[in-house]
Image: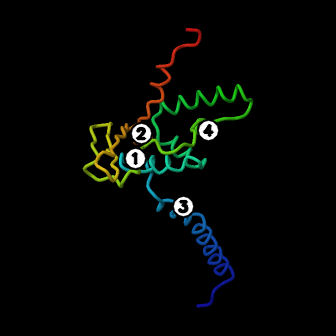
């Protein structure tokens, strides 16, 4: 059966449309296959937090660390950034207030075991262990709107400071 010119054009248009759709949708499917949101579980949040903590010299790690801490601690860092910005006349954001430092742990945490995780409703505790039995620390996490985050408690430190002029 001979093809007409309009049939050839429509099949060419169809191929072009399908190829264009493929080019648009393929990268989106690759993104969907990426790593899961670290805030999707307490264990993932704790692992990502430790990983970011060990790499704070990188601005991307500071942004990830910031994303993985509780809302009140983020608000405290944002307030500090506004003060720093007003004093220095340079732009600052909350993650900029995170100072690169050696890990706060006195040991290198081993991989988290299932028995080191305790979840009670919207709160969780992850026990971090080192090679020695005495090497142990607790991370407290809370489930917020965006997922599980580490309860850093920076807002509590702000409340403990004496008001100016006291």
The mark that comes first in sequence, 1 or 2, is 1
* Helix, strand or loop under label 4: helix
Q: Is residue 71 above or below residue 133?
A: above
Disc on the earlier residue, 2 or 4: 4
Q: Are marks 4 and 3 in contact (CB under 8 Å)?
A: no
Please provide percent x and percent y for residue 104: 46, 41
Question: What is the spatial separation of the Cα atoms under label 2 and label 4, in whole angstroms?
Answer: 18 Å
The picture places residue 122, in percent across and down from the top left corner, at 32, 37
Q: Badge 3 local density, few (<14 within 10 Å), some, or many (20+)?
A: few
Q: Nearer the N terminus, badge 2 or badge 3?
A: 3
Q: Residue furthest top?
A: 166
Q: Secondary structure under badge 1? A: helix
Please report the residue visible at 58 percent of the width from the left and 49 percent of the height from the top.
60
The residue pinned by badge 4 equals 96
Task: Give the residue number, with chain letter if any, for mark 1.
Answer: 46
- Residue drawn at (56%, 64%) of the image: 27
Is disc 1 in contact with disc 2, using a CB cutoff of under 8 Å?
yes
Mark 4 / mark 3, whichever is N-terminal: 3
User: How far apart are labels 2 and 3 at the CA level?
Assistant: 30 Å
Label placed on residue 28: 3
Element carrying mark 3: helix
Q: Which residue is mark 2?
A: 150
- Whole-percent x and y of residue 159? 47, 20
Residue 147 - label:
none
Q: Earlier in the sequence, mark 4 or mark 1?
A: 1
Query: Can you say which quadrant of the picture contains the N terminus?
Result: bottom right
């Amino acid at each position: 059966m001979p093809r007409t010119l309009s049939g050839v054009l429509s099949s060419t248009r169809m191929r072009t449309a399908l190829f264009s759709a493929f080019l648009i949708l393929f990268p989106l499917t690759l993104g969907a296959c990426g790593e899961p949101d670290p805030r999707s579980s307490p264990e993932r949040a704790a692992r990502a937090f430790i990983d970011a903590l060990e790499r704070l010299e990188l601005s991307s790690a500071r942004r990830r660390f910031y994303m993985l801490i509780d809302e009140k601690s983020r608000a405290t860092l944002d307030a500090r950034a506004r003060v720093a910005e007003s004093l220095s006349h340079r732009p600052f954001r909350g993650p900029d207030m995170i100072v690169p430092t050696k890990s706060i742990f006195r040991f290198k945490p081993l991989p988290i075991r299932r028995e080191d995780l305790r979840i009670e409703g919207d709160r969780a505790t992850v026990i971090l262990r080192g090679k020695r039995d005495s090497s142990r620390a607790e991370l407290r996490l809370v489930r917020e709107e965006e997922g599980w985050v580490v309860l850093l408690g920076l807002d509590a430190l702000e409340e403990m400071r004496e008001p100016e002029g006291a």
